[in-house]
C-alpha cells in the first residue's frame, strides 16, 4: 500500500506537520504511514492512526486533523490518507445471502487529501487551484438500541462483518432529525435550505442512499455523486466519502458557496455528519 503514499506525495515537496492514517482493514505495525515518513526523512512529521471505525472513519479523522491544525504554530496543514484493503477480509467460501451481499458491495479504496488552516490555504503557493471544502459544523450520535446491527470484529482468519436488515430502517427513522441538528449548529434551517444543497451520503448500499433522499425530501440529483461512486467503486468503507468530496470539488455544476451536507454510518450504530461549503 506504499504506492498510495508515493502517488499522493509525487508532487508535494513540503512535509506535513501531521499525517493521519485511516483504515479499518489494512493494519500493519509499523504502519504504512510510518514507513512513508521514514522513507522520506520527514523527521518532524507526527503520525496519528485513526483506525477501526469502518464506513464513518473519514469524519473523526477530519475532526482530528482539524484539531491538530488548530494547535499548530507551523505550516497549518494536516494530511489524511486512507488505505482500505477490504478484499483481504471477504469470505469467499460462505454462500449465505448476507455474505453474498457483503462480497458484492465492498471494495478496496485509497485516497489522500490535505486540511489547511484557512489563511494558510490561501497563502500556500504550492496549492495552484484554490478550490476545496470549508468545514462549518460537525455532529455525531450513537443511535439507541442498535449495537448489534452492525459490527466489524476479529475472526479466526480475518475481520468479520455483520450488517442487519434493520440498519436502513434506523437510518431512515433518524436521519432528518440528525441533519436538522447539524445544520442548526450554524443557524441554518435544513427544511428551508435543502433545495440549494448537495448531499454526500455514504453509500452503504443503494437502498441507504434512497432512504436518506426520501427521508429528507430531496432529489436524487442532489446526491448524484453518492450514487455514481457506489456504482463505479463500490463501498470502500472510510475512503468512500472522500471520493465523493473529490468529485464535488471538481464538479463545475456545483458552484462555490453551495452547502454540502455529508453523512456516514458505522458500528454503534453511529451516525456522523459534516456541514461544508464549497470554495
Image (spheres, helix red, strand yellow):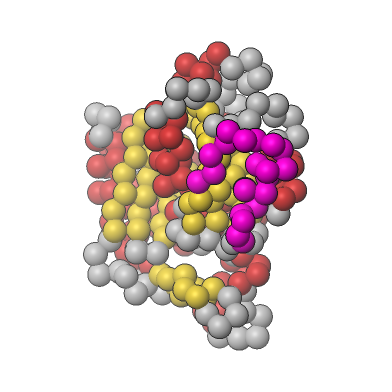
Q: Which of these two is toward me, 146 or 259?
A: 146
The percent position of residue 159, horizontal first and vertical second, equals: 54, 73
Q: Which of these two is toward me, 43 or 183?
A: 43
Image quarter of residue 246 = top right
Is residue 218 shown to the viewer in this render? no
Q: Relative to residue 246, is residue 197 drawn left or right?
A: left
Q: At 63% from the left edge and 30% from the top edge, which residue is drawn?
A: 15
Image quarter of residue 260 = top left
Q: Which of these two is toward me, 27 or 273?
A: 27
Find the magenta span and give its range.
28-48
Image quarter of residue 225 = top right
Q: Relative to residue 145, is residue 112 drawn left or right?
A: right
Q: Relative to residue 141, is residue 25 drawn left or right?
A: right
Quarter of the image with the N terminus is bottom right
Q: Please give the count of numbered marks on the rendered protein.
A: 0
Is residue 268 shown to the viewer in this render? yes
- Asked if the magenta segment contains residue 29, the reply would be yes
Q: At 41% from the left edge and 70% from the top edge, which residue is drawn?
A: 150
Q: At 62% from the left edge and 48% from the top edge, which residue is drawn?
A: 34
Q: Which of these two is toward me, 212 or 245?
A: 245
Q: Is residue 80 above or below residue 93?
A: above
Q: Is residue 276 above or below residue 112?
A: above
Q: At 55% from the left edge and 13% from the top edge, which residue is drawn?
A: 123
Amino acid at each position: 500500500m506504499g504506492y498510495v503514499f508515493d502517488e499522493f506525495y509525487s508532487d508535494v515537496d513540503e512535509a506535513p506537520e501531521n499525517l493521519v492514517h485511516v483504515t479499518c482493514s489494512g493494519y500493519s505495525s509499523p504502519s504504512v504511514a510510518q514507513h512513508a515518513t521514514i522513507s522520506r526523512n520527514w523527521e518532524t512529521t507526527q503520525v496519528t492512526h485513526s483506525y477501526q471505525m469502518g464506513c464513518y472513519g473519514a469524519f473523526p479523522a477530519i475532526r482530528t486533523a482539524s484539531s491538530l491544525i488548530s494547535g499548530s504554530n507551523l505550516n497549518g496543514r494536516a494530511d489524511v490518507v486512507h488505505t482500505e484493503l477490504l478484499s483481504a477480509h471477504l469470505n469467499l467460501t460462505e454462500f449465505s445471502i448476507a455474505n453474498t451481499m457483503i462480497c458484492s458491495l465492498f471494495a478496496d479504496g485509497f485516497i489522500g487529501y490535505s486540511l489547511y488552516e484557512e489563511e494558510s490555504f490561501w497563502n500556500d503557493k504550492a496549492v495552484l487551484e484554490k478550490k476545496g471544502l470549508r468545514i462549518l459544523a460537525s455532529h455525531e450520535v450513537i443511535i439507541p438500541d442498535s449495537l448489534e446491527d452492525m459490527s466489524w470484529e476479529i475472526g479466526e482468519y480475518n475481520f468479520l462483518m455483520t450488517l442487519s436488515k434493520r440498519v436502513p430502517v434506523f437510518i431512515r427513522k433518524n436521519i432528518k432529525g440528525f441533519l436538522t441538528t447539524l445544520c442548526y449548529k450554524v443557524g441554518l434551517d435544513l427544511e428551508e435550505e435543502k433545495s440549494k444543497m448537495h448531499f454526500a451520503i455514504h453509500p452503504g448500499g443503494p437502498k441507504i442512499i434512497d432512504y436518506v433522499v426520501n427521508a429528507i425530501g430531496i432529489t436524487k440529483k442532489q446526491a448524484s455523486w453518492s450514487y455514481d461512486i457506489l456504482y463505479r467503486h463500490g463501498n470502500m468503507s472510510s475512503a468512500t466519502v472522500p471520493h465523493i468530496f473529490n468529485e464535488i470539488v471538481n464538479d463545475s455544476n456545483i458552484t462555490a458557496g453551495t452547502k454540502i451536507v455529508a453523512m456516514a454510518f458505522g458500528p454503534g450504530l453511529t451516525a456522523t455528519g459534516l456541514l461544508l461549503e464549497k470554495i
